Image (cartoon, rainbow, N blue to C red):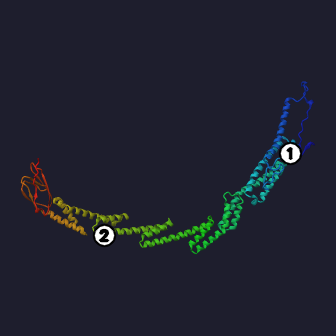
Amino acid sequence: MDNDSKDGFKTIKPAAFNRTSENTTAPTKTRGISPKSLNVTLGLVFMLVSLIIVIFFLPGWVENNKSTESSTSPATATTSKSSEIKLPEARASSPEEKHVIGQLSLEEQTQNLALRKEAQIFLQEILEKQKLLEENNAQSWAGKEYTTGLNHAKKGDELYNQQQFSVANQEYKRALQLFNRLTEQVGPIYQENLEHGMNALDTGDSNLALTAFSKAALFTDDSQEAAKGIVRAQKLDDVFAHIEDGDGELSEGRLTEAKMAYQAALELDPDTRLAQQKLLEVNKLLAEKQFNSHMSAGYDGLEQQSFAKALDQFNKALKIKPGSSAAKTALQQTKHQMTTIDIAKTLKEASAREKNEQWQMAIELYEKALKLEKNLAEAQAGKLRAQNQLSIHQRLEQILSRPERLSDKKVHAETSAYYSVTSQFDNQGPILTKQLADLENLLKVSATPVKIRLQSDNLTDVVVYKVGKMGMFETRELNLRPGKYIAIGRRDGYRDVRIEFLVSQDTNKQAIQIVAKERIN
């Protein structure tokens, strides 16, 4: 190694200037450096100075603006936490270092600059990871591994300050690898402790639950699950004491008391799954008990034909168990029995109306029964029977109300035939019997002629409808069948006269006058 070298770096020396090396053929003018050579030399010098400033001084200036510590503090200088890592700060180069820098080649200086930048990137990542780990109290659960990472980072700071960037970066990488592995464990370890705590809550182990949730509380917990778990763990013994009380009451069949005990447990901690399950089970048992009670009461009402009570009890049972086939069947049975009894009562009443010859009311009752059961044969036959009887009754009433129509031989014949058929019916009631008797008498009377006397003035021409032309007369006798008759009298110069008269057994007691008296002007 040359004598002018130091620490392995060669000192850059200016090149010797040889005046005799100039071209002897040059013109004999004032000797000196040519403008072109001067420009090249100045350019090289400027570039070298700029490179030295960028590599060794500029980073220091930037870092000094960010730092609040002394320029001589180490990269791992502590603030509020002894383990906090800080970016290494630039310090003024000593004369010896400046001498060495001057000996570095341009390639070596570029390489150092790249290594320094790489170190800055590593440090930035390390600081981010360290912040995350400290927020999650890594020193409490990572222990030796976290301390080892800090030591690698500190060692890297020392090497960095010694300008040994390559070796410093190796230490930074080791620290970053450890921190990366630890940050990946933050979520799983937190979740694992939460799960252990929740399992302990389910089994009633308050100590294990409190320990697990306390460990989970070391981590950043935005959901506050760990804090909630600690509160639940502190109440866990009392909660399970109530659950045990409930189990005791349940074993003795005291369902209401068991329910109250489980509810007391849930009042302390509404999220206790065991208490929730126990309460659900006892509620099912209570519901089953109530269901059976309603069903029993419903069948009692059905047996006593207290249908309103039966329906009410069966509906209450169905409300407890909406899908119960037993309750649905009981309701159908009740409704069917109600319908059967209602039909029987209706048919009985309809039959009574028939016996009383109240045909219209009987028809209405049979129709009511058919609404209850549309294919009920007894109601169908009864309705048809009542309708026929009503038709006979109405026709007989019509004939009897207009006896004069029987004066017509055709009407008389038809009525006689109808009487013959109707009188053959069996089970004739009092009303029908009387109607037939009245009709029989009317037919006899209407078939027996009655002698009547007509009087006129021997000037009026008389015609009797359905009998014939009578001509002019003063007195005339006729034998007519009972009924209604019309006589017309005509006379020239006088208005026609129209006389309606009814022939009956009493008609012969008085004369019927037919005289046109009103003169036409």
Would you name the residue on which mark 1 appears?
A: 93
Quadrant (top left, top right, bottom left, bottom right) of the N terminus? top right
Is residue 31 in sight in this rendering? yes
Q: Nearer the viewer, residue 33 or 514?
A: 514
Q: Residue at x 52, y 71 (%)?
A: 289
Instruction: State left or right for residue 101 relative to residue 448.
Output: right
Type of amino acid under label 1: Ser
Task: Please identify the quarter of the rendering in which residue 446 is found.
Answer: bottom left
Q: Position of residue 340 (x, y in %)?
A: 38, 68
Task: Please identify the quarter of the rendering in which residue 336 is found.
Answer: bottom left
Judged by depth in the image, the label closer to the viewer, 1 or 2, is 1
Q: Nearer the viewer, residue 380 or 407?
A: 407
Q: Residue at x 58, y 70 (%)?
A: 260
Q: Secondary structure at mark 2?
A: helix
* 1 or 2: tag closer to the N-terminus: 1
Instruction: Sort mark 1 into few (<14), some (14-19) or many (20+) by Cα contacts within 10 Å.
Output: few
Q: Position of residue 129 (x, y in %)?
A: 74, 53
Q: Secondary structure at mark 1?
A: loop
Task: Please identify the quarter of the rendering in which residue 9 is found.
Answer: top right
Q: Nearer the viewer, residue 417 or 223?
A: 223
Q: Residue at x 10, y 63 (%)?
A: 509
Instruction: State left or right for residue 186 relative to residue 160.
Output: left
Give the distance between the C-alpha atoms of the residues marked 1 and 2, in whole angstroms: 132 Å
Q: Position of residue 115 (x, y in %)?
A: 80, 46
In this rendering, is residue 343 above or below 7? Answer: below
Number of numbered discs present?
A: 2
Would you name the residue on which mark 2 appears?
A: 352
Instruction: State left or right for residue 246 relative to residue 52.
Output: left
Type of amino acid under label 2: Ala
